[in-house]
Image: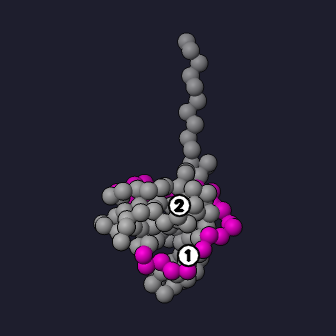
Amino acid sequence: MLLQPHPLLWTAIENTRMIRFAYHGKDRIAEPHDHGILKGSVQLLSWQVAGRSSRPLPNWLLTKVDEITDLALLDQTFPGGRPTATGKHIKWDVLFIRVKPAKSQLHVVPKRKPD
């Protein structure tokens, strides 16, 4: 098995598009955030907003890409990156792509006027 990015996930992350997929027998709708290699397998970190889950939604979901089925790109977009509860990101072995931060999270530092 080649450890490479999934083209549809790359497109979804690059264009902040929602995805629909099945994972461990449950249909899910999510915002894809990070895609990379973790502990020797290609994985996806997403913010699941709808569908079935064993945990309350919305919530973060880490999935092994080779266990995802029925993956589809939706027309709906999302604003971009979200803050995590800890403020820290997963330490990927290899990070293929990360969603851009939401515009509301960008901090603009005003330029100082010269003295």
Q: Residue at x 56, y 41 (%)?
A: 107
Graded by Cα atoms within 10 Å as few (under 14), some (14 to 19) or many (20 or more), the crowding at tag 2 reads: some
Mark 1 and mark 2 lie on one chain; the one further toward the N terminus is 2
Q: Residue furthest right?
A: 75
Q: Is residue 83 covered in magenta?
A: yes
Q: Is residue 71 above or below residue 36?
A: below
- In the structure shown, which secondary structural element does the residue marked by tag 2 occupy? helix
Q: Position of residue 36 (x, y in %)?
A: 41, 61
Identify the amino acid type marked 1. Leu
Q: Position of residue 74 (x, y in %)?
A: 65, 70
Q: Which residue is mark 2?
A: 10
- In the structure shown, which secondary structural element does the residue marked by tag 1 occupy? strand
Give the quarter of the image for residue 62: bottom left
Give the quarter of the image for residue 106: top right
Q: Which residue is mark 1?
A: 71
Task: Tell me which segment is drawn in magenta.
Answer: 66-91
